[in-house]
Image: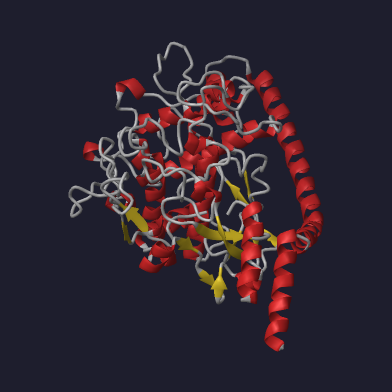
Amino acid sequence: MLLSLQWFWLVLLLYLCPQSVEAQFPRPCTTLDALQARMCCPLWNGSPCGFRSGRGVCAPHPARDLPKPVDYRVNWPRVFYDSVCTCWGNYDGFDCSQCLPGWKGPQCLQRHHVERKEITDLTDGERETFFSSLQQAKHSVSSRYMILTSNDTTVDENVAFINATVYDLYVWMHYYSAKNYAGSANNAAHKGPAFVFWHRVFLLFIEREIRELTGNQDFFIPYWDWTRTNHCNICTNKYFGGVGPGGRIDSASPFSKWKTICPFQESLHIICIHTDASDPPHLIRNPGKDPVYDTLPTAEDVEDTLASKHFDSPPFDRTSKNSFRSKLEGFDVPKDSRHLSDSMHNLVHRYLNGTMTLVPTAANDPIFMVHHSFVDKLFEMWLQNHSDATYPEDDLVHPAQRGQANMAPFFPLRTNDYYSGRDTQTLGYSYKEHSLRRTGDGTSIRQAAGFLEESTTGGVQWQWPVLGVFATVLVFISLGAAIKYKEKIWQRKNTETEENQSEVDYRTNSLYTVWMEERNKHTDNISS
């Protein structure tokens, strides 16, 4: 009786002081018992959510009190669970067994950092590691999660849970959130302010799952800077596979054997059910072959997007104008001679003209992740110059994308505004600039070098001014390297201080203090 009363007060305290708790339908939460109990609080080290180890607690979530939605994907995870794990300190994961992004170690008190590079800058070893990790993820069944299938998202009981590979789990999560809600033109991950935040969490999720699968804690997702090319320079067998007959991936590429999951069926409220499960389709790409979308975004498009003063603007949907989000996502289209109907993020999807074109199922194509890694890089660049930006609080925002709504379908729960104010350094990663820096007119140094050679052979005496430009660029690169080296030295000196401070913050957390008092009382009772 005493222990039950202690649990009641502790859970009540956590409910009144909720913390955001990342991933999809943990296996222990798909059992009949868990679904009937409406509880997703798996055991870790012998207790729910690692409670006895001071990692977290099984607690109610606010969404449980919201009205029942027409489509059960709204108000996540209200239809499925009333209580989920809430993790303390730097602990994370559906059972609080993992560390938050940017932390590692048995107690999650050591800083962890990776540097995401432009994909064409990867060394041979890095490129081989990246692609072999993707292949392993595509062919390894997830031991941690299952995916949900349904032929009607308006009927609560009309669901089934099935196995999926680690990569297909990632595909499913995007489909689940990107497909429009029943009777609506809106979804949880696009056409609104949650777009950049949702996809940031999404990339962090698959990065961590692949690290868990491969044991390589330094695995990272590179980015593809599509402004540095006028064609798909990674649609080759060196990278994601060349284009074969009918848009199929070239047979010499391992990606030619990849099959897609979750066919796109917008008119039906269906989640991941193949009409012909015996023969799911292969990946398709026909980059630049659609005459309406035969170009990639340019450096000028990026500059125009980054120049936006406001993060988002009313009515906070696909019709929003003059905001960073609407331009980056590609709905606010520049008016120029290209006569585009989509730009930036959307245009890249359209340009690839195949599996990537239908956004809900686009993650089937692994180019998706390097494309969105660059989108995330642009988001971070904008944030660095707009540190005062906040997540919009307005009734015009669709309920699924409001600041305090939970991102579907992540466990532990993350609200849409959770990462507002957190930069990539805090989350354990940063972006390394492309090795080919652009000159003032947008051309790369390599292109300028080619121009120098042509002008010399043609007898035009422009070489000395051009060499002067090169000398100036090299000076700035050297200064940048020196500054970066100094920053790294400073970071090393302060790492121990940060870790100590984190430990102090964690141990003085009011929830942790309550937990310690309850554990001590429980221990005293057992001793008596």
Residue 436 makes an appearance in the image: no
Residue displayed at 67% across by 58% down: 13
Q: From the viewer's perspective, tell me whether residue 245 is left or right of residue 74.
A: left
Q: Is residue 8 above or below residue 121?
A: below
Q: Residue at x 40, y 14 (%)?
A: 339
At which x and y percent is residue 26? Answer: 44, 62
Occupied quadrant, residue 164:
bottom left
Residue 194 drawn at (x, y percent)? 52, 36
The count of marks equals: 0
Q: How far across and how far down the image is residue 80, in percent?
A: 42, 55
Q: Examine the rendered structure and indicate whether residue 514 appears above or below residue 524.
A: above
391 sits left or right of 367 in the view: right
Quarter of the image that includes the N terminus: bottom right
Front in this rendered view, residue 363 or 252: 363
Q: Position of residue 30 (x, y in %)?
A: 39, 63
Q: Residue at x 81, y 58 (%)?
A: 497
| Camera-nearest residue between 447 and 185 | 185
Q: Nearer the viewer, residue 59 or 209?
A: 59
Q: Is residue 240 left or right of residue 495?
A: left
Note whether 429 is above or below 138 in the view shown. Answer: above
Q: Residue furthest front?
A: 1
